[in-house]
Image (cartoon, rainbow, N blue to C red):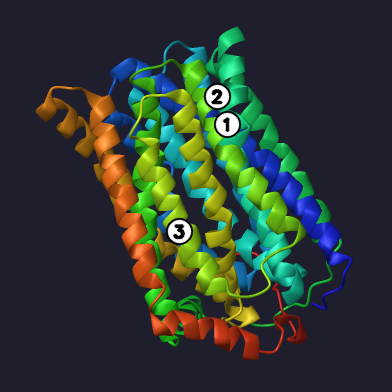
Amino acid sequence: MTKTNNNYGRFLLLWAGEFISSIGGGLTSFGLGLYIFQKTGSAADMGLLTLLGFLPALILKVPAGVLADRYDRRLLMMIGDGLSGLGVLFILICMLQGEAALWQIYLGTTISSVFSALLEPSYTATITDLLTKEQYSKANGLVSMAGSSRYIFSPIIAGFLLAVSDIKLILIIDICTFFLTVVAAAVVRAGIKQSIKKEPEPFFKSMKEGWTAVVSRKGLVVLVVISSLICLFMGVFQVLGEPFVLSFSDSKTLGIVETAAASGMLVTSILLGIRGIKKNFVRALWIGLAVSGVGMAMFAVFENPVLICSFGFLFFAAIPFANNSLDYLVRTNIPAELQGRAWAFLGFISQLGYVVAYSLSGVTADFIGRTTGKGVGPGSAITVIISGICLVIVAVIMAGIKPIRELEQSAAEQPAPEQQEMEVSHEMV
């Protein structure tokens, strides 16, 4: 597929669909998390919801990445986005018949996660399909902003909706967003002329090639291992930030805090979307992570909404710099035709840290709360503070690792990926 400047418009359409979908998913995540916490008062139960919404997609990430390199990526996005709405629909039906049991919410969340596994590798690889090397950094700023919309807009919207209605309205809105994203992917697909592979490679051979693309570069291996630790610490914050705030405030305050804090990501994502990062990607990566760690640790020190918003803003504002730099270092060191499966392996390994965080952080917070006799709020605070400090330490260590610095040098020496011919199969399984 030949890349042109016109493809940036197609990218923007695809991005807009994912932006809306992210808001819808954030509404459901906020609403269901609050629903479960109000019923059980347990951080562990909230953590289990997060885990079940994440683990199936992680397990299926690698085979989904292979499919993204073998078949029509836009069609896979349409299938994944469309069918993932079935899980939300199942939860809605259960709630229309009365209060949904925990197992029903967990099952619906799992169903949604299974189908959404098709989306991420295809979406990430499609960005490489559409854009030139010079457009990556600017585009990744917008992608980061779309991902942050579930933290920026969803909480305050959900808080307002829950004040005038109940969670069923939130689920209905989320289901509607799936249709918009499917339409956006369909329009982009129709505007791209694709070459067809006559005979796709064997499935497991494709998986092996993706793994080889990752392990052939020592810097990528080191980077993905460190990324797993980073995901661990950030995952703790994702799970325990809400129980900490809810321990001394209400859902309306929580929505305001989350939106105000996450607006930091919006500010820097817009900045990166306009200007991008031109050089010193490794420096931007470790400094961004270190600042995020400071913001995370200080977030849980005070039970003051203003201070919490301020340090939460700092945490989120630094994340796009780290994400943008990490994305560039990986994307420019992997051949374009291997992007889907390679990203799947990278994502799978690095995001194992989230699995650990989602599995243990709630249990840890509940245990500390019971042991100290102060409850789940202080237990969550202690766990978050420790994780923030650990993130700072890992970030500083990363700055001195030579193989990671060599990735940036290698990226500068590589020919632009747009010079390579791309082949995307038009067949389906």
- Residue 256: numbered disc: 2
Report x, y in % for residue 245: 39, 25
| Marks 2,3: beta carbons within 8 A | no
Please say if 405 is above or below 149. below
> Residues under labels 1 and 2: Cα distance?
5 Å
| Marks 1,2: beta carbons within 8 A | yes
- Judging by the rendered image, the residue that carries numbered circle 3 is 289
Disc 3 on helix, strand or loop? helix
Q: Residue at x 72, y 62 (%)?
A: 138
- Residue 259: numbered disc: 1
Three-letter residue code for mark 3: Leu
Q: Residue at x 42, y 13 (%)?
A: 99
- Residue 8: numbered disc: none
Q: Nearer the viewer, residue 26 or 275?
A: 275
The quadrant in which the N terminus is found is bottom right
Three-letter residue code for mark 2: Ile
Q: Callout 3 environment at 10 Å: few (<14), some (14 to 19), or many (20+)? A: many
Q: Residue at x 29, y 19 (%)?
A: 40
> Residues under labels 2 and 3: Cα distance?
24 Å
The quadrant in which the C terminus is found is bottom right
